[in-house]
Image (spheres, rainbow, N blue to C red):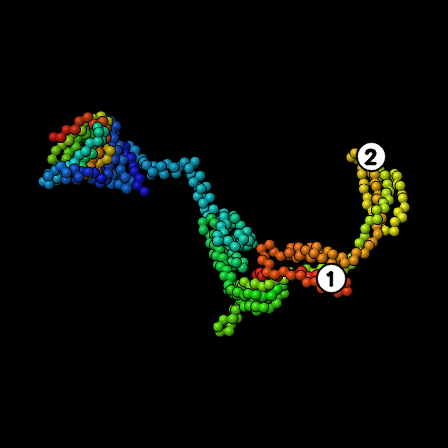
Amino acid sequence: MGGYIRYTIKNLNREKLIREMVKIAIVKNIKLYEDKLSFVVKENCIKKIDAVLQKRGSKVISKTAVGLLNYIHTSIFRVGVIIPSVLFILAVIICNGYIFNIKVLGTEMVNKNDVIKIINNCGVYSICNKNQIDTTTIENDILKIDKVSLVSAIVKGNTLVVNIKEKLYNPEFEDKDGFLPILSLYDGIITEINIIQGTSLVKVGQTVKKGQEIVAPYVMDASGDVLSVLPMADIKADVFYTITQEVPDKKIEQIDTGNVIRSKKIMLNNMVIYNQNIRVSFPSYRASEEISVLTDRNFLPIKYVNYVYYETKFIEIDDYFINNKTQILEQLAQKTRQLVDEYDIIKEEYVNVFSVAGINRITHTIIVNKSIC
Amino acid sequence: MFNFFNELKEKYLSISNRICPYQMVMMGDYLLYVEGNVTIMTLSANNIVFKLKDCICTVCGMGLGIKEITENTLTIIGKISQIERV
């Protein structure tokens, strides 16, 4: 550290003194004050300068440090500088023994909170003594997470840095035991098989049921070894959408005769105030009820109930199916078409009618060629 | 110390004249810089006399002082009014 010393001296032959000092040091800021002379020399030359001054018989009035050295010399005795400096140094020393932050890097699939929980379980929190941190334990505990491949935990400054390298999943070779076969989504007859990966369990022309395994999750290599793979395939089949309805030839219908009986009842809230109580003499009838509130809102909620009884009789309609066949078939076709998906292309559509013992069994079938996996 | 003395010599002096016993530069009337074998002879606030190799220089002015002196350089600051070479 290059400090400087300012000399203030009293000497009669100043010029000669300067000539001698110049030979041994760089002399700066030479100033004259009546019979005094002041100059500045480097700190490392003061011994030689002192010797020259002594030799020349100069009287040194003052010798003070200047520049940074002077500041350091004087600041040593300043309480306002010493106390904060000491406190600062103490704080640095104390802080150096603690961590104040936990940084977890490389978490994409792994939940960061889970990692921090594991770190906390190891007794390491955001503010923690460095001596309490066992990075090996932290690494081993984090490695227990399935998706973690590599872990490194280091204390860098006041931060615990946990760097995680997650496992890279290759769907073709990872989780070999976790592959499931492809199942048929519909009932149908196989028309086309395009296997991308896996082993086909069905053939073209074969009937499959919904939920049946159609592609197995393995392949057999040239040496005969079975290799598990993720099954991938595009298998098309003729899918049958069928609805069956049974319609009798004859039908019994209940029709109104036109005779009506009316009965009235007046109620206050649920309490009957007036009841006409007419006896219904029809052998068969249907009833309807009309309720009207006589008063507005909740003020005396009086209700007027009108019962109407319609006399009915049962008649037998012959040739019901023959007369309404077109309408019945159309309704059934509409119901069947509702089962077909929006973008399905209908390949074939037909109706079977099977009559036995006065019952007509109608089957409407739509055939759609679509992917079943 | 960095200066352009060599460039000036190369540009304006012949080869034989390039070996100068001393070199001097003045910046305004406030600073005088001298290179050469300098020996202080007289030192006061109004007058500084120094000896060079083959001459004696007198610097007159007010509030004169030596900013820096070594065996081969001299830097004088102050209100310089006259420089005389004898």
Pick out the residue farthest to the left: B16
Q: Position of residue A341 (x, y in %)?
A: 61, 56
Q: Position of residue A309 (x, y in %)?
A: 84, 46
As drawn, the label of residue A300 is 2
Question: Image check: A304 left or right of A111?
Answer: right
Image quadrant containing the C terminus of chain A? bottom right
In the figure, B20 relative to A102: above or below?
above
Image quadrant containing the N terminus of chain A? top left
Q: Label 2, label 1: how many angstroms apart (C-alpha)?
A: 58 Å
Nearer to the camera, A40 or B29: B29
Instruction: Decide: few, some or many residues near mark 2? Use Cα within 10 Å; few <14, some 14-19, many ≥20.
Output: few
> Which quarter of the figure has residue A61?
top left
Residue at 79 percent of width and 56 percent of height: A317
Pick out the residue farthest to the bottom: A223
Instruction: Decide: few, some or many residues near mark 1? Use Cα within 10 Å; few <14, some 14-19, many ≥20.
Output: some
Q: Is residue A52 visible?
A: no
Q: Amino acid at mark 1?
A: Asn
Q: Amino acid at mark 2?
A: Leu
SS for dot 2: loop
As drawn, the label of residue A360 is 1
Residue at 15 percent of width and 31 percent of height: B57
As drawn, the label of residue A70 is none
SS for dot 1: strand
Nearer to the camera, A365 or A59: A365
In the figure, A78 relative to A129: above or below?
above
- Which chain contains the residue that carries disc 1? A
- Which chain contains the residue that carries disc 2? A
Q: How many marks?
A: 2
Residue at 68 percent of width and 55 percent of height: A330
Question: Image check: A160 left or right of A201?
Answer: left
